[in-house]
Image (cartoon, grey):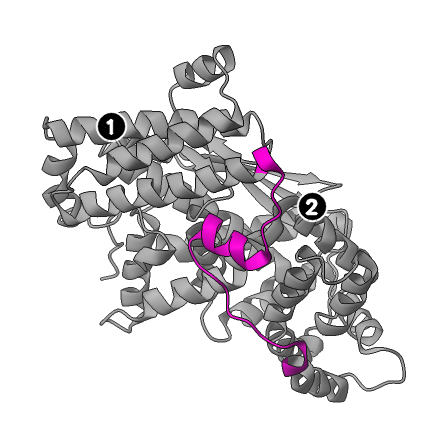
């Protein structure tokens, strides 16, 4: 009998830890006090950085307080460092509280750095941003390490034009017609949800609204609103390829951002009363777990050839795509995935001011095979979000390694460990 996994250790892990989280001890009171101060600092920094607060569904009194008594960036840094010192004096009394303790410390440290960056207009290098904002550093590669993969793609797509032109012409065969977007995304998201629900007990009231937007530096976004509800937006400005339907359905929805935020709210906010999880600062270590788990969730929900088989059977006919192209599309997709970290290296060069924008666009076209239009969109993303890009690929690798290091190597075992990650206060250094 195929039983769903309870929402992260509902019977054991949380029940044992529950008494610690709610015990009326001076320690728990101080953590709750620290939690409130942390929320106010995140909201205060959001007044200076419009992208910083990705989601907030907590007590509105904190928003009102910050609006009526705004903090300067200098005050934010001072108060964050003071709160860190007070946290350092606390002694967590259980494994779960240790995770909470570490979470607040690392998130506050990141917040202090972000506020300092804005206050002083300090330009941190790509790797400094990675370490200080996201609690990790992505691996380094030389661009010529990707040449072998480019040679394989050259053989797959023979011709005299540049490989980027040939690659984009090949991909053009897999563009979803605009009038089919809604139908295809609805089917894809439903399948992502059905596959997730086999292993993770979703909340009864969970739901989302799907919107199509333009003029954004990203391809998709989840805006979590609280009470297990999300607004999911898909950027239709650039062509959307058939593989993105499942990718975005998993990444933004199930078992990605929507599921992640709903589980955190259910298990940590509502059950344990940890209000710090009602606010999500974008430029923080939490984003590496959020983005990494969302990307890993795609291959977890669609292992092996499941993804292409579903696309070929269910999505290709609606989009009017020839299913006979599927085999080459799989080979092409696996090869281009190997170029993923090339984007990080170009971002590193660009953000470190080692290359100009025009050079970055050319390198993106060569090493990631992006079109000129897509390459320029990538630069907009880097300008807005900096080293955030590491959270997608390096985050996925960290999450994948952590999940698959579990003793139970079965699909059910991976899902159980993945659900544990989604519902607990883990950050890069605690993986």
Q: Is residue 254 visible?
A: no
| Residue 33 coordinates in the image, percent (x, y) | 26, 25
Asked if residue 302 lies left or right of residue 81, the reply is: right
Q: Residue at x 16, y 31 (%)?
A: 28
Residue at the spot x=32%, y=31% of the render? Answer: 83
Residue 152 % position (x, y): 69, 87
In the image, what residue occupies the spot 63% across and 58% down? Answer: 244
**Percent position of residue 37, x then y:** 34, 26
Which of these two is toward me, 419 or 290? 290
- In the rendered image of this protein, does residue 216 appear above or below residue 154? above
Q: Magenta residues? A: 118-145
Q: Residues within 10 Å of mark 1 (few under 14, many from 20)?
A: some
Observer-nearest residue: 126 or 431?
Answer: 126
The kind of secondary structure element at disc 1 is helix
Query: Disc 1 designates what residue?
Result: 32
Cα separation, mark 1 vs mark 2, equals 39 Å
Badge number at residue 219:
none
Query: Of helix, strand and loop, which one carries label 2?
Result: strand
Judge whether residue 22 can be spotted in this image. Answer: yes
**Which mark lies nearer to you, 1 or 2?**
1
Give the image quarter of residue 351.
Answer: bottom right
């Amino acid at each position: 009998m195929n039983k769903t996994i309870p929402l992260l250790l509902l019977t054991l892990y949380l029940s044992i830890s529950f008494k610690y989280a709610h015990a009326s001890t001076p320690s728990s009171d101080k953590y709750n006090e620290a939690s409130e101060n942390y929320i106010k600092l995140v909201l205060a920094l959001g007044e200076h950085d419009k992208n910083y607060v990705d989601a907030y569904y907590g007590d509105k009194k904190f928003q009102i307080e910050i609006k009526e008594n705004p903090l300067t960036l200098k005050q934010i840094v001072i108060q964050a460092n003071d709160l860190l010192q007070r946290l350092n004096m606390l002694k967590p009394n259980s494994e779960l509280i240790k995770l909470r303790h570490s979470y607040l410390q690392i998130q506050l440290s990141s917040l202090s750095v972000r506020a300092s960056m804005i206050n002083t207009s300090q330009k941190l290098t790509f790797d400094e941003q990675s370490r200080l904002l996201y609690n990790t550093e992505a691996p380094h590669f030389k661009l010529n390490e990707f040449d072998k993969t480019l040679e394989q793609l050259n053989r797959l797509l023979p011709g005299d034009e540049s490989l980027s032109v040939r690659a984009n012409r090949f991909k053009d065969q897999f563009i979803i017609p605009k009038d089919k977007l809604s139908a295809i995304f609805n089917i894809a998201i439903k399948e992502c949800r059905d596959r997730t629900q086999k292993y993770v007990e979703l909340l009864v009231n969970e739901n989302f609204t799907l919107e199509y937007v333009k003029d954004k530096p990203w391809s998709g976004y989840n805006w979590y609103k609280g009470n297990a509800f999300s607004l999911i937006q898909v950027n239709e400005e650039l062509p959307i390829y058939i593989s993105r339907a499942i990718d975005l359905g998993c990444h933004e929805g199930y078992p990605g951002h929507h599921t992640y935020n709903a589980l955190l709210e259910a298990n940590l906010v509502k059950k344990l009363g940890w209000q710090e999880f009602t606010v999500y600062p974008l430029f923080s270590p939490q984003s590496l777990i959020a983005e990494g788990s969302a990307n890993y969730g795609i291959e977890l929900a669609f292992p092996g050839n499941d993804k292409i088989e579903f696309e070929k059977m269910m999505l290709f006919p609606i989009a009017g795509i020839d299913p006979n192209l599927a085999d080459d599309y799989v080979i092409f997709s696996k090869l281009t995935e190997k170029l993923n970290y090339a984007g990080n290296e170009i971002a590193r060069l660009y953000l470190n001011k080692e290359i100009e924008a025009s050079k970055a666009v050319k390198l993106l076209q060569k090493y990631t095979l992006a079109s000129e239009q897509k390459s320029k969109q990538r630069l907009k993303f880097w300008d807005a979000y900096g080293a955030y890009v590491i959270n997608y690929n390096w985050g996925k690798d960290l999450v994948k390694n952590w999940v698959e290091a579990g003793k139970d190597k079965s699909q059910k075992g991976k899902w159980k460990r993945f659900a544990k990650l989604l519902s607990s206060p883990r950050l890069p250094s605690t993986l």
